[in-house]
Image (cartoon, rainbow, N blue to C red):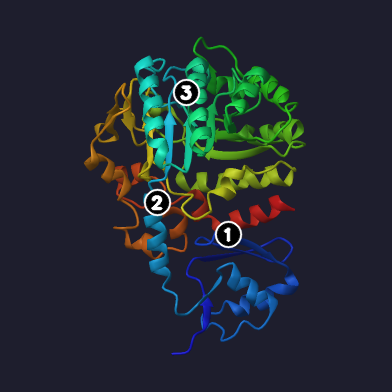
Amino acid sequence: MENKYVPSRFNAISHTDDNGVVLFNSYTGAITYFSNQEKQVVISSLKRAGTNLLENEIQKDLHTNGFLVSSSVDEKRRAQFLHQSLHRTDIMHLVLMPTEACNFRCTYCYETFERGKMKQSVIKGLKAFVQEKAASLTGLHISWFGGEPLTSLDALEELSESFLQVAKEKEIQYTCDLVTNGYLLTKEVFERLLSWNITQFMITIDGVDEVHDRRRHLTSGGKTFDTIIENLMAIKEVSGSFDITIRTNFDEDNLQEAAELTTFLKDHFADDKRFGIMYRPVGQWGGKNDDDIPVCSRTMANQKIWELTDEAITQGFRMSSMITDSLMPAASVCYAAKPHSLVVGSDGQLYKCTLSMNEEFNKVGEIHEDGQLELDYDKVAMWVTSGEETDTGCQSCFYRPACQGNHCPLYRMRTGESPCPYEKRNIKKVLNLIWKNSI
């Protein structure tokens, strides 16, 4: 049988507003734009029947980026092999909770705040654990989470300095991100965080003034909006590279005011490319107010995420880099589904997921003061092996290399359904937005 070049099973295509096309391949992670003039060659080259030769620059480009593959390539096997690479032992991801207490009481929060600051014995254990693992690591990524991590800045500092030292000695690539409500994120605190290699931040703003304050207020009920905006405006003066995602959580309660927020954020932050926006629907995540949250229907939420994003980009505000990043190979796999990822609670309890802290199947072990981990591997396996291995729908999906059927193992456990990411469900729209965001 002669060798031909056929379209990859992992392609997606979207038409842009200027009559061009954007192609995406979830195995290579390539996202490529072709103009109206080039479009015809692209579309005819990607016909099912394939092409015998790479006759022009466009076809060579399609092949280089993985949109055209040799007919002898087994793409299913490629995807399987990519899945196995998640089991690398030279990288580690820890989600650390320097405190589980919080200075906010958001209306839709699912956390219970029973446990406060991280115990000294847990800090000791983490230092010892990372020190011991370091010999076999090439990469260590820390996600700082809570509670509100900045209410426990001393624990964050002690651990950061220890990890930085180890990473330097062992030449480990050390990266971090931090989720914060932004209230304590003064310019001075921000500069300290940057010095500890924390360069990616997510801060939630749900509306302008009282809309935000009604949803995301202090424990005492006090307002938070003005303080957060003052902090972010001061941070703009900091030089250097960092990436801030402003996240807006929406439900029926604040959707009407979303346009006003977009305009406000654009006026204050669109001139700084280090700030980007991301919209996400509020879910009933297991908190005590669940029954009172006016959540949007799934269809409406799917539609609104991208409508709001489109509006922001149209106004000249950047889309969060997290969206494009999530399309890359294995990047839509939830950390809970990755074998090398663990959540460490402030009391030393180990989990796989931060969304179901009180469920027994998520309590997978504990860390001891000497750095030894006690793990229940049967529980861990339940989180790690529930995706494309068993789901035939996922196995034949164009998005398989990006999410591997494990975008949210918790959703699968609770519903028995495939947990498809928002990006996959609206891939044509998302590709068009990526194109629009780039011009």
| Residue indicated by mark 3 | 159
Mark 3 vs mark 1, CA separation in Å: 42 Å
Whether residue 390 sits left or right of residue 53 in the image: it is left
Residue 403 appearing in the image: yes
Front: mark 3 or 1: 3
Question: Residue 351: x percent and y percent?
Answer: 33, 32
Residue that extends furthest to the bottom in the rendered view of this protein: 1
Mark 2 vs mark 3, CA separation in Å: 26 Å
- SS label for mark 2: helix
265 vs 307: above or below: above
Residue that extends furthest to the front in the rendered view of this protein: 169
Which quadrant holds the N terminus? Answer: bottom left
Question: Residue 348: x percent and y percent?
Answer: 33, 23
Tell me which residue sits at (67%, 75%) in the image.
58
Tell me which residue sits at (75%, 26%) in the image.
237
| Residue indicated by mark 2 | 86
Q: For residue 33, what is the image quadrant?
A: bottom right
Q: For residue 355, what is the image quadrant?
A: top left
Q: Which callout, 3 or 1, points at the residue further toward the start of the chain? A: 3
Q: Which callout, 2 or 3, points at the residue further toward the start of the chain? A: 2
- SS label for mark 3: helix
- State the residue in front, 342 or 382: 342
Q: For residue 73, what is the image quadrant?
A: bottom left
| Residue indicated by mark 1 | 428
Give the amino acid type for the residue marked by disc 3 in the picture: Leu
Disc 2 crowd, CA 10 A, few/some/many (<14, 14-19, 20+)? some
Front: mark 2 or 3: 3
Tell me which residue sits at (47%, 32%) in the image.
294
- SS label for mark 1: helix
Q: Which callout, 1 or 2, points at the residue further toward the start of the chain? A: 2
Whether residue 79 sits left or right of residue 249 in the image: it is left
